[in-house]
Image (spheres, rainbow, N blue to C red):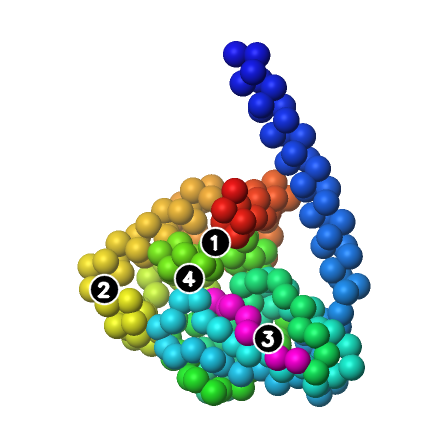
Amino acid sequence: MGSNLNVRLVFLIFIVVLFAAGTGFMSYSQSNGVPLQEAYANGNIIITQNTSAGTVPHQVTISNNGRDPIKVQIGDVLISNSSQDLVIAENKTVSKNSTETVNAYGLDPSTLSVVGAKLKPNGTSSNAIQQVIYGSNIKDTNNATNAQVQIWILTAGVNFNIYSGEPVSLVSAQNINYTKLRQIVTDAKAALAAEFNVKVDNIKSINQSQTSNSGDLINGIMNWFKSTTGI
């Protein structure tokens, strides 16, 4: 009993220290490079859709032609006139005169992603979407697919059309059937309702409110940390 208590105490201290370090890192990162939208407005970057419709997560290439590094952050929104809008799914720095590949989730299930399409930054996503991203694992297809469907539900509603656009391509790309996709959607709805403590019919209001409490965000960051490090 005593040893278990000590282990829990050590783990709690570790969490507190990790959160403090993470807060310091995020504060540091805010001054470590030019924000994506500012760099785009200055004409220093080109953002290109890299992956075809149905890919989870999607990938974009960001070419930095400027003299300063660019900070790309979870929640940065990318829009296009000819391809699906995206939300950045990882934090990354793009050094000057270099190109990086960055993972992103789709925002609009009804619109297909087009390889080679150009995108531009357009603000940031809601806290709810960012929380889903932090709680996901972009390296695990099943986990990332569930997160992708959760984001579609937040942006397009609980009854979004799974028989058009990106969902159709996802079924083909992952070689699954619609029974499987419907189950993924059902599980995603349940996960969102549980995480944000709402009824399924009220899920859309989560994204509209653009809010999440600090405890939920910390839990999301911790889940992201564990999924990316394997701890």
Provide the residue designation for mark 1: 136
Quadrant of res 198: top left
Image position, residue 127 (x, y; %):
59, 56
Residue 201 or residue 10, whichever sits in front: 10
Q: Main secondary structure of the magenta part?
A: strand
Q: Is residue 67 left or right of residue 75?
A: right
Q: Nearer the viewer, mark 1 or mark 4?
A: 1
**Residue drawn 72% across the image and 79% down it:** 96
Q: Earlier in the sequence, mark 4 or mark 2?
A: 4
Q: Are marks 1 and 4 in contact (CB under 8 Å)?
A: no
Alpha carbon distance from label 2 to label 3: 31 Å
Measured in 3D between alpha carbons, the distance from the residue under mark 1 to the one under mark 4, in whole angstroms, is 9 Å
Q: What residue do we see at 40% from left, 67% from top?
A: 56
Q: Amino acid at mark 1?
A: Ser
Q: Is residue 99 magenta?
A: yes
SS at circle 4: helix
Label disc, if present, on residue 148 of the rendered structure: 4
Label 2 belongs to which residue? 176
Task: Give percent across and percent down for residue 158.
Answer: 36, 58
Crowd band around label 3 with a 10 angstrom C-alpha radius: few (<14), some (14–19), many (20+): some
Dot 3 or dot 4: first in sequence order is 3
Query: Which comes before the other along the chain, label 2 or label 1?
Result: 1
* 145 or 197: nearer the viewer: 145
**First in sequence: mark 1 or mark 4?**
1
Kindly indicate whether the residue at mark 2 contacts the one at mark 4 (C-beta within 8 angstroms): no
Residue at image point 62% right, 62% down: 91
Q: Select label 4 or label 2 by which is in front.
A: 2
Pointer 3: what residue?
A: 100
